[in-house]
Amino acid sequence: MNQQYYEPDIAIIGAGAAGLSAACQAAKAGADVLVIDENRLPGGQLFKQIHKFFGSYEHKAGVRGYQIGQALLEQVQQAGANIMLDTVAYGLFPNMELGIIHQGKAGTVKAKKYILAAGSKENYLALPGSTLPGVMGAGAAQTMIHINRVLPGKKIVMVGSGNVGLIVSYQLMQAGAEVVCLVEAAPQIGGYGVHASKLRRAGVPIYVGTTIQRVLGETQVTGVELVDLGPGFQPIDGTQRTLACDTVCLAVGLNPMTELAWMAGCNFTFLPALGGHVPMHDENMCTTLPDVYVAGDITGVEEASSAMEEGNLAGIAAAEALGYMTPEEAKRQKDAVWQRLQVLRSGQFGQKRQEAKQLQIDTTLAFLKGRRGGGQA
């Protein structure tokens, strides 16, 4: 088998919101950009989002996610970036070579700079019956109805009241399913009230302080046993009750897909507010390896708007580092991006993420300063 070899200025792993935004910025500056994604279509999560975005006009308020994805993809193509789909990036090695499998053929990418925008993956719950056919992640259900046009089930119980659980529940109803109920272990809803209100108006009960004790069925899901939770999230005896359903969707959080950053040798920090172990990065989205940048959910799980802005930062910074943009122009653009990010991370839901993100940057800068000091000793 002949080995395919690619030498772009910048290789971007992930063609979602962050990766496409980074590609657009870097390619517009004049860099030779290669975007790699394992899927057959670019756009990542954006093309599964049929709801309208919130926020300000500059953050695409009132525009549906798939429309944002289409516009972003057009901008990337117009900027001249190359997009390589159906391509698995299986390893970023310490010699800064990226191993890929493109349409069944092995290849190697040797880029001057890498931007890791691999996104995140769904968490799962281990409980009796959770391996039965019919138990799936909420993101998987969303993919089925929006990409594959297949209804995952007719009577669905959703677990988790974050924005993913609330939004996907409503979208499942739009696709023709009955959402029997939504259950949340915490004593309050985790997502935006506007999404929860839409479900309640549609007649979907939301049970807080409640979880699934076990999934019922022999060869497939036939129902669930719910139980109320007391202090310390301990089940309360005598509160068990059963509900009939054929599908259980789990919206119990996401965690960053950091495997390539680990393999490359990036240093990590543990920040629960961002989904666990995340690669250290500075204000330019550069990791502790000078040729590796990160953007989007790999840096900590947030909304798509924040992922796009982090992609913008990484693309600008990588282009600047390669000499395709003057420091003055890069600073002007990066300052504008940071102002938009500050707006996105303000308010009730963004404050904790803002604090965690700043801690991530401060930790990285302190680490790099210590490393430089150690090298001088």
Image: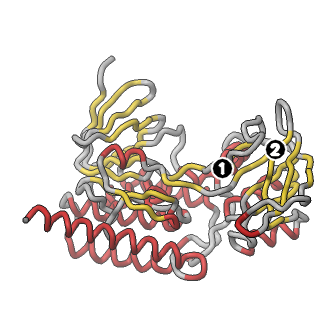
Q: Is residue 36 visible?
A: yes
The amino acid type of the residue labelled 1 equals Gly
Image-based side of 115 in relation to 216, left or right? left
Crowd tier of the residue under label 1, counting other residues whose Cα lies within 10 Å: few below 14, some 14–19, many 20 or above: some
Q: Which residue is mark 1?
A: 139
Whole-percent x and y of residue 72? 49, 58
The quadrant of the image that shows the C terminus is bottom left
Please report the residue visible at 52 percent of the width from the left and 67 percent of the height from the top.
Answer: 273
The vertical placement of 105 against 150, above or below, is above
Secondary structure of residue under mark 1: helix
The amino acid type of the residue labelled 2 equals Val
Q: Is residue 344 visible?
A: no
Location of residue 67 by image quarter: bottom right
Mark 2 vs 1, N-terminal side? 1
Separation (CA) of disc 2 from disc 1? 19 Å
The quadrant of the image that shows the N terminus is top left
Crowd tier of the residue under label 2, counting other residues whose Cα lies within 10 Å: few below 14, some 14–19, many 20 or above: many
Whole-percent x and y of residue 345? 51, 76
Q: Which residue is mark 2?
A: 215
Whole-percent x and y of residue 31? 26, 54
